[in-house]
Image (cartoon, rainbow, N blue to C red):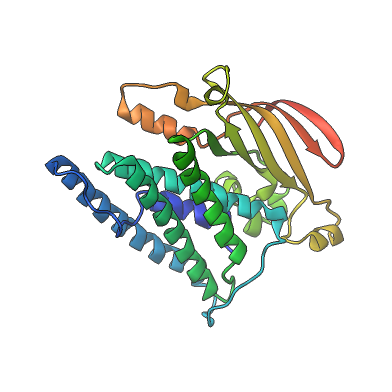
């Protein structure tokens, strides 16, 4: 099993990706320098993040012969949604970085997908040798789904029209098991699955007449979980259940600027589904929210 916090931290640290596949397709000296910078920076970031991860997450557990661990039924599959989200974002960031370095979009997309899958698979290898975890086949499948969601759209439409996003609100569950669900806001965002919602935000104006800045989104969440398995939560008196959402979303990429730094910040901010109206379906009931996050 691998928690979202590990995936997300690593995907940020190695956002430029490893790039043994990259070959310069421009003779420009500027682009060659950029590509060298990306190669060096990504290699250093990847190596450092693996060392840090091994120290922070695996040092408290003994090593074991490599094994697989079936966590497919844990946490209402919220961790799998986190894997898909992280793999998509890492692929998108890596592709954008390689396009900046002078590679073609097609080649950058390919490198981005392979890099993202390789990085996240290497974490599964670390999990497999740790007595506290174990490699997860369903994690690998979720990773591939995130890679495919990005790469497939580029192959089909030459652009991204469906964006995975995340939103979060604090819950009363985290204080009940702070070691597992987080101690403080920063940890809770990464660990408390009860407060996370994962969205697929559809850029409607790419399909029909629609405001360019407004998207429609569907979301998935779960609640009532302080343990990984339903039976443990039920025995503890909690009611684990799934939540589905339909709502609107703001497409921040519709706002372009001549400032590259501002555009980068918009790109990052667009990973988050901002508070907006949504309709929730759970436990056979519907509930409206004016500002759901």
Which quadrant holds the N terminus?
bottom right
- Quick one: 242 or 200, which is closer to the camera? 200
Residue 48: x and y in percent read: 35, 61
Position above or below: 50 against 210: below
- Quick one: 104 or 100, which is closer to the camera? 104
Residue found 59% across the figure and 45% down from its top: 189
Residue 61: x and y in percent read: 54, 75
- Quick one: 123 or 141, which is closer to the camera? 141
**Residue 138's image quarter?**
bottom right
Residue found 51% across the figure and 80% down from its top: 63
Position above or below: 279 against 169: above
Residue 18: x and y in percent read: 34, 57
> Is residue 141 shown left or right of residue 50?
right
Which quadrant holds the C terminus?
top right
Position above or below: 42 against 60: above
Position above or below: 120 against 107: below
Residue 257 in sight from this viewpoint: yes
Residue 78: x and y in percent read: 66, 51
């Amino acid at each position: 099993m691998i928690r979202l916090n590990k995936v997300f931290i690593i995907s940020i640290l190695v956002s430029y990706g490893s790039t043994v596949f990259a070959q310069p397709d421009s003779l420009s000296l500027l682009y060659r320098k950029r590509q060298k910078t990306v190669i060096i920076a990504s290699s250093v970031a990847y190596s450092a993040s693996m060392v840090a991860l091994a120290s922070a997450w695996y040092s408290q557990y003994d090593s074991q012969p490599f094994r697989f661990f079936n966590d497919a039924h844990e946490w209402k599959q919220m961790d799998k949604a986190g894997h898909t989200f992280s793999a998509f974002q890492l692929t998108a960031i890596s592709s954008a970085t390689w396009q900046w370095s002078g590679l073609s979009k097609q080649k950058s997309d390919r490198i981005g997908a392979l890099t993202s899958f390789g990085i996240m698979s290497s974490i599964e290898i670390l999990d497999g040798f740790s007595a506290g975890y174990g490699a997860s086949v369903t994690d690998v499948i979720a990773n591939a789904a995130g890679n495919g969601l990005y790469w497939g759209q580029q192959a089909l439409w030459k652009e991204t029209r469906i964006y995975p996003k995340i939103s979060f609100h604090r819950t009363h569950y985290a204080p009940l098991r702070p070691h597992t669900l987080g101690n403080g806001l920063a940890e809770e965002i990464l660990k408390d699955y009860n407060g996370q919602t994962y969205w697929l935000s559809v850029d409607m104006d790419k399909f029909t007449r629609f405001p360019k800045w407004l998207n429609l989104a569907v979301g998935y969440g779960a609640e009532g979980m302080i343990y990984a398995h339903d039976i443990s939560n039920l025995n503890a008196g909690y009611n684990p259940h799934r939540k589905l959402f339909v709502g609107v979303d703001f497409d921040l990429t519709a706002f372009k600027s001549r400032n590259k730094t501002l555009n980068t910040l918009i790109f990052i901010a667009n990973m988050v589904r901002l508070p907006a109206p949504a309709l929730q379906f759970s436990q056979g009931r519907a509930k409206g929210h004016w500002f759901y996050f």
